[in-house]
Image (cartoon, rainbow, N blue to C red):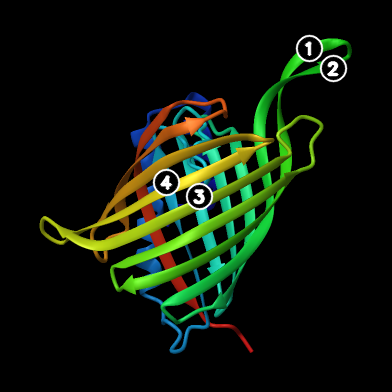
Amino acid sequence: MFPKGVWIATLAKILKNQKSLFEFLVLIFTSFLISDSLMAQETTPATPTGQFGGVITATNNGVSFIPSFTLGKPAVLFDLTLSGKRFSFDPGLRFGMDGKPWNFTFFGRYKAIKDKPFTLSLGGGPVFAFQKRLVKVNGKEVEMLVNQQFLIMELVPTYKISPKVSIGLYYLQGHGFNPVPPNRLNFLSLNTTISKLPIGKNLNLKINPQLFYLDVENSRGTYFTSNFTVTKPGFPIGFQTQFTQELNSEIPGDDFLWNVSLLYSFSTPFQKVK
């Protein structure tokens, strides 16, 4: 594996000089591929009690966990999870390709109903959203990166129709603690997941269409969004494209959003030490 100091120094240089997306991806994916190769040589616990994993995404247009919110430029997303039998901790760290933070989420989740066709998950946690704002410093207006804090609560019921098809609802409520709005939002999504559709040779397609309603400070909108993910079984790198179409909305924003992304997925089981 790359020495830690070399990796960090190289990453800082790339972000500082705003090198190409390709160089950035090569650094990340090569580092993780070597790391996984070394881990594979270690002894795996006989009875894993938890899982650490996640997805690293590099995209031409950063889209938030609420699909109508976007950074509007290339981004890198780190969606991680540390899970046990019922509880999980799922941090999400999103940055622009220039290295500046976009938003951080720190969700905890509890699987109230699991291992059945109908499942129910409850969760929530803090969100930190970073924006450029003009701030007065010593009587002068200076553009600074400030963050807004929110507390998010979510409810996720899902019903598995078959091994490849499931339907569900996703409800999210957010409360802000900021002098500048928005400080209240509600998000409700009706979604379907169709997975493991064979395409070509040894490739699978997953489709995740959603119809969602968004209420931000009494401004409302309805949208349709879907992502298409292509993966190869046993191979960590995949590709995804997503689009979001506004149907009827009072909320300021683009009528149509789209992006293409390169994904790197990883997962490592672990055993709790008694």
- Judged from the image, the secondary structure of the residue bearing numbered disc 4 is strand
Q: Eyeballing the image, is 46 above or below 177?
A: below
Instruction: Quickly name the residue at label 4.
Output: 57
Image quadrant assignment for residue 131: top right
First in sequence: mark 1 or mark 4? 4
Q: What residue do we see at 61% from left, 67% from top?
A: 122
Quadrant (top left, top right, bottom left, bottom right) of the N terminus: bottom left
Amino acid marked by disc 1: Glu
User: Could you tell me the amino acid type at mark 3?
Assistant: Phe
Q: Position of residue 29 (x, y in %)?
A: 37, 50
Regarding residue 26, the answer to whether it shows in the image is no
Q: Earlier in the sequence, mark 1 or mark 3?
A: 3
* 185 to 251, vertically: above or below: below
Return the residue at label 2: 137
State yes or no: discs 4 and 3 in contact (Cβ < 8 Å). yes
Which numbered tag is attached to residue 78?
3
State if disc 1 and disc 2 touch (CB < 8 Å).
Answer: yes
Pinpoint residue 126: horizontal percent, then vertical percent.
70, 52
Q: Which residue is mark 1?
A: 141
Mark 1 nearby-residue class (10 Å; few <14, some 14–19, many ≥20): few
Task: Locate residue 104, reporting x and y percent.
Answer: 62, 46
Task: Estimate the spatial distance between the alpha carbons at disc 1 and disc 4, rounded to whole Å.
Answer: 35 Å
Q: CA distance from mark 2 to mark 4?
A: 36 Å
Residue at image x 56%, y 51%? 92
